[in-house]
Image (cartoon, helix red, strand yellow):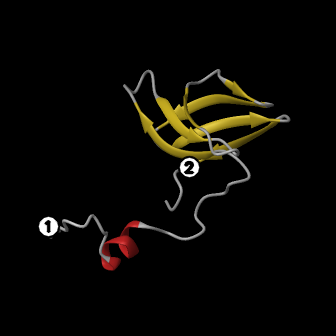
């Protein structure tokens, strides 16, 4: 379905299918995407303050450390606990 709206307004049906309400946890790290070769994956994340950055295994943000990235998500250690972060809505 091609939509060509010269006014730049997104039709309601498109917006409804493209958005999900209350999916992101704004209080902690949110995974936005994973990219790169399988032996050197990187992740695009949204930090709690809203800043978006690219991270790699071994990097730290605050008291948390990225310990692994794979096709299913990333692993983060914080305060001695390991947590898997997956793509939202998945």
24 up-or-down from 61: above or below? below
48 to the left or right of 22: right
Q: Secondary structure at mark 2?
A: loop
| Residue for point 45% across, 21% down | 40
In the rendered image, the vertical position of residue 54 relative to residue 30, given as above or below: above
For this orientation, the residue located farthest to the front is 7
Q: CA distance from mark 1 to mark 2?
A: 31 Å
In the rendered image, residue 87, in percent from the top left (x then y), is placed at 52, 51
* Snapshot quadrant of residue 7: bottom left
As displayed, is residue 82 above or below residue 86? above
Foreground label between 1 and 2: 1
Residue indicated by mark 2? 86
**Disc 1 residue crowd, few under 14, some 14–19, many 20+, Cα 10 Å:** few
Residue placed most toward the observer, 75 or 22: 22
Using residue 75 as the reference point, say whether residue 89 is left or right of it.
Answer: left
Q: Quadrant of residue 63?
A: top right
Q: Is residue 22 left or right of residue 20?
A: right
For image coordinates 79% across by 36% down, the residue present is 78
Q: Residue 52, image x and y in percent?
A: 56, 38
Q: Identify the image quadrant of the N terminus.
A: bottom left
Residue 73 against residue 17 in the figure, above or below: above
In the current view of this chain or complex, which residue is farthest to the bottom? 13
1 or 2: tag closer to the N-terminus: 1
Image quarter of residue 75? top right
Q: Label 1, secondary structure: give it.
A: loop
Q: Residue at x 29, y 75 (%)?
A: 11
**Residue at image mark 1:** 2
Residue drawn at x 59%, y 30% as measured from the top left: 68
Foreground pick, 1 / 42: 1
Q: Position of residue 86 (x, y in %)?
A: 56, 49
10 Å crowding of disc 2: few (<14), some (14-19), many (20+): some
Choose between 12 and 40: the one closer to the eye: 12
């Amino acid at each position: 379905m091609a939509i060509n709206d010269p006014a730049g307004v997104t039709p309601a049906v498109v917006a409804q299918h493209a958005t999900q309400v209350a999916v992101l946890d704004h209080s902690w790290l949110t995974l936005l995407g994973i990219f790169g070769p399988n032996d050197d994956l990187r992740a695009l994340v949204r930090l709690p303050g809203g800043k978006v950055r690219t991270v790699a295994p071994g990097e730290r943000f605050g008291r948390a450390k990225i310990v692994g990235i794979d096709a299913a998500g990333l692993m983060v250690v914080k305060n001695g606990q390991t947590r898997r972060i997956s793509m939202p809505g998945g």
